């Protein structure tokens, strides 16, 4: 069922415009290539409208934020909206500083997003206006578990309704909702939290999936999240170091097939 969304990416080879952070930019470009799409990494305000115009989707990641790139994000987002391109937001570290939090809300005011992906603390900040983070990592107090799931699902659904975006909360389990449909995804491996950029890479993967699957956005998001988690499971091996794991993660994405995704996706409707 979900493999078809990966196959659409591989067949269409969409072009994804990524305005992302300099810590993970290389891995983000490589994962877009690995899944079968093509990346363009451009954040100069004087060219972002032209770049977005020739692409099929736009990813905005605020991980290494500065005033220069904020202007570029807004310009690119408005242009992508005008063209009907999917736009994905990664509010990295929202809640960690006033600048990050204010920038997220500026972007939400000026750009319509197709999907918003972050950890639980980041999405809680976006939904409620304030929150706590451990740098750019989730606060352990915000962990999704059996007790907290109803509350998290409630504010995620409300945020989806307010923004019109698919909300994707990633962690030990991943929660997705568009306000109508919701699911939990249990793919992944703990090693993914020990490398920089697994979340940023997933956001760019979402950019590829949404560019190639505009008629079923929620299912396309679920497929992308499941692929990333399944790749993490495939990448792990006993006594595997973090650099080896990172390389194997990209290898797993690059060799993933629709049948493999169908066989390995752990997606539970809520």
Image (tube, helix red, strand yellow):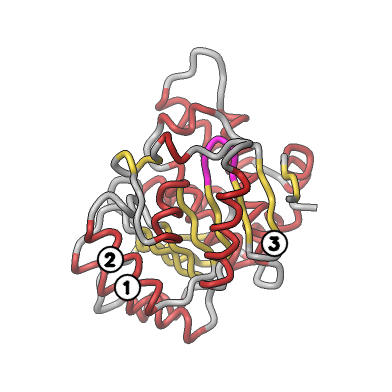
Task: Return the residue found at the far bottom.
Answer: 82
Q: Secondary structure at mark 3?
A: helix
| Closest to the observer, 180 or 67 | 180
Could you tell me residue 195's position as x and y percent?
40, 33
* Residue to which mark 3 is pinned: 8
Asked if labels 1 and 3 touch by Cβ distance under 8 angstroms, the answer is no
| Closest to the observer, 85 or 267 | 267
Q: Secondary structure at mark 1?
A: helix
The image quadrant that residue 123 belongs to is bottom left
Specify the segment rendered in magenta. 170-174
Nearest to viewer (mark 3 / mark 1): 1
- Please report whichever mark, 2 or 3, sits nearer to the chain's N-terminal start: 3
| Closest to the observer, 158 or 111 | 158
Q: Is residue 193 above or below residue 45?
A: above
The image quadrant that residue 133 belongs to is top left
Asked if labels 1 and 2 touch by Cβ distance under 8 angstroms, the answer is yes
Q: Residue at x 43, y 36 (%)?
A: 141
* Residue to which mark 2 is pinned: 102
- Please report whichever mark, 3 or 1, sits nearer to the chain's N-terminal start: 3
* Residue to which mark 1 is pinned: 106
Q: Is residue 37 left or right of residue 103?
A: right
| Closest to the observer, 46 or 166 | 166
Specify few, some or many for label 2: CA neighbours under 10 Å numbering under 14, 14-19, or 20 or more.
some
Q: CA distance from mark 2 to mark 3?
A: 36 Å
Q: Residue at x 25, y 74 (%)?
A: 71
Task: Return the residue found at the far top.
Answer: 239
Q: Residue at x 60, y 37 (%)?
A: 147
Q: Is residue 148 left or right of residue 52?
A: right
Q: Residue at x 37, y 79 (%)?
A: 110
Nearest to viewer (mark 2 / mark 3): 2
């Amino acid at each position: 069922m979900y493999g078809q969304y990966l196959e659409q990416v591989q067949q269409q080879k969409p072009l994804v415009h990524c305005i992302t952070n300099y810590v993970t930019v290389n891995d983000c470009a490589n994962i877009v290539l690995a899944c079968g799409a093509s990346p363009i990494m451009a954040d100069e305000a004087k060219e972002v409208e032209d770049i977005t115009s020739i692409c099929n989707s736009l990813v905005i990641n605020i991980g290494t934020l500065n005033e220069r790139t904020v202007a570029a994000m807004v310009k690119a987002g408005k242009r992508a909206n005008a063209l009907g391109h999917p736009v994905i937001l990664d509010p990295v570290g929202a809640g960690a500083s006033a600048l990050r939090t204010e920038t997220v809300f500026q972007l939400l005011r000026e750009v319509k997003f197709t999907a918003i992906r972050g950890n639980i603390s980041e999405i809680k900040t976006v939904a409620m206006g304030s929150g706590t983070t451990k740098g750019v990592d989730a606060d352990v107090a915000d962990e999704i578990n059996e007790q907290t799931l109803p509350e998290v699902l409630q504010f995620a659904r409300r945020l989806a309704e307010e923004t019109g975006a698919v909300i994707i909360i990633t962690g030990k389990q991943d929660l997705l909702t568009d306000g109508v449909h919701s699911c939990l995804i249990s793919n992944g491996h703990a090693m993914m939290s020990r490398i920089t950029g697994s979340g940023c890479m997933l956001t760019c993967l979402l950019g590829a999936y949404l560019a190639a699957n505009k008629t079923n956005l929620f299912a396309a998001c679920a497929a992308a999240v499941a692929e990333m988690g399944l790749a993490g499971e495939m990448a792990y091996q006993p006594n595997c170091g973090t650099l080896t794991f990172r390389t194997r993660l990209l290898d797993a994405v690059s060799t993933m097939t629709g049948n493999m995704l169908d066989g390995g996706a752990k997606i539970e409707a809520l």
